[in-house]
């Protein structure tokens, strides 16, 4: 079984990338960042940034070969562009590919996989399975980003206006901090045999909307949080309606994302089946959870 040393991260800046790079560097991997723009925000100075042209397979393959890359972590936001990255990785002799996924349970839940917002992820999963005699793969599913979701006002609306509570707000869903997603990436590459050609599932916590609200009220009593009840069935119907009319496509996609996180049938509670222990992820204690909420609300 292969062991990995040199790792390329594509899309290493932005929301999640820096946490992945930090965890890989902390775990002792040699990391390079592949970038369209050459920007380096959030990256340690010892991590080399290599500018690539994602429209040119040769450009990516050259960067991978020149740096003896044996594992490729994709973190690009445009999921349907990934078959080209996989081809370039194969041409460069890369052993393992981790696609940009890092969210809902697309690989483990048929309803989630059907949601149009995940078409690019699904295409990538299918492509990796077709190419598995040429390159190994691991998909990471971690539910919603906990700290990012709070900071952006997605999990609790801190920008004014009501927080939407979906279906039964006591339903649990998995949420993971950016740092723990990074740890999961490093954990996968430290456990090549156990993670070869499969999806892994991680979470920092499994929590309900009501539990999250109770913590928010405790740690930020000054924040006035209004709520409104919403049904995911309605959200789903509206999103398909918008798609059909070709209107507000971003709004429709956002609706599908909400359904994948808060819809009971969409497999978003990963607490019973996860790989936390294998990958070195520890669930947040109640105190740590409060701290994450306090810091990000
Ligand atoms: N579970 C969740 O709650 C959640 C939330 C957000 C995102 N995600 C997932 O996490 C992954 C990363 O998302 P992110 O928000 O970190 O991404 P992002 O910040 O939008 O983009 C990451 C980096 O990718 C590069 N990039 C941007 N557009 C690109 C393009 N068209 N082609 C190639 N590279 C491009 C940019 O770096 P350079 O300029 O250096 O190339 C950018 O800084 C995605 O799979 C996303 O679906 C999950």
Image (spheres, rainbow, N blue to C red):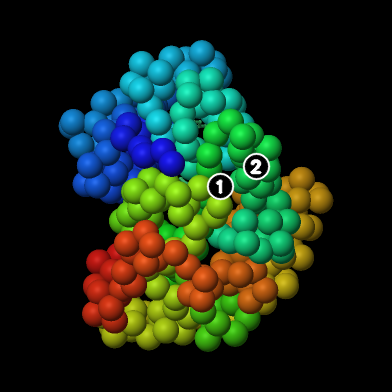
Q: Nearer the viewer, residue 168 or 175?
A: 175
Position of residue 167 measured from the top left corner of the image (x, y, whole percent): 63, 81
* Residue at x-position 46% and y-position 54%: 194
In this rendering, the answer to whether 233 lies above or below 286 is above
Position of residue 214 measured from the top left corner of the image (x, y, whole percent): 37, 85
User: Is disc 2 placed on a helix, strand or loop?
Assistant: helix
User: Is disc 1 placed on a helix, strand or loop?
Assistant: loop
Position of residue 242 measured from the top left corner of the image (x, y, whole percent): 75, 54
| First of labels 2, 1 by sequence position | 2
Residue 142's disc number: none
Q: Is residue 204 visible?
A: yes
Residue 197's disc number: 1
Q: Residue placed farthest to the right in the image?
A: 244
Residue marked by disc 2:
129
In this rendering, the answer to whether 287 lies above or below 238 is below
Spatial CA distance of label 2 from label 1 is 8 Å
Q: Residue 159 sits in which quadrant? A: bottom left
In this rendering, the answer to whether 57 lies above or below 261 is above
* Residue at x-position 42% and y-position 84%: 211
Contact (Cβ within 8 Å) of mark 2 with mark 1:
yes
């Amino acid at each position: 079984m292969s062991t990995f040393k040199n790792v390329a991260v594509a899309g290493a800046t932005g929301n999640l990338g820096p946490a992945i790079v930090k965890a890989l560097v902390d775990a002792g991997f040699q990391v390079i960042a592949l970038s369209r723009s050459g920007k380096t925000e959030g990256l340690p100075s010892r991590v080399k940034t290599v500018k690539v042209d994602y429209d040119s397979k040769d450009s990516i393959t050259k960067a991978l070969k020149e740096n003896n890359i044996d594992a490729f972590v994709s973190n690009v936001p445009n999921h349907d562009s990934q078959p080209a990255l996989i081809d370039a990785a194969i041409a460069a002799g890369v052993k393992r590919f981790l696609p940009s996924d890092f969210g809902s349970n697309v690989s483990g839940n048929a309803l989630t996989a059907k949601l149009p917002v995940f078409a690019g992820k699904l295409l990538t999963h299918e492509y990796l399975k077709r190419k598995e005699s040429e390159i190994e793969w691991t998909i990471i599913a971690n539910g919603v980003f906990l700290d990012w979701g709070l900071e952006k006002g997605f999990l609790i609306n801190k920008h004014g206006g009501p927080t939407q509570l979906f279906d039964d707000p006591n339903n649990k869903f998995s949420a993971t901090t950016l740092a723990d997603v990074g740890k999961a990436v490093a954990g996968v590459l430290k456990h090549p045999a156990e993670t070869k050609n499969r999806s892994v599932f991680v979470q920092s916590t499994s929590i309900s909307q009501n539990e999250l609200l109770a913590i928010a009220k405790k740690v930020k009593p000054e924040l006035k949080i209004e709520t409104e009840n919403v049904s995911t069935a309605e959200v789903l119907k509206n999103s398909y309606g918008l798609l059909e009319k070709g209107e507000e496509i971003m709004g429709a996609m956002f609706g599908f994302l909400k359904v994948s996180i808060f819809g009971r049938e969409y497999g978003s509670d990963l607490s019973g089946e996860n790989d936390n222990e294998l990958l070195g992820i520890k669930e947040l204690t109640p105190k740590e959870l409060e701290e994450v909420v306090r810091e990000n609300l």
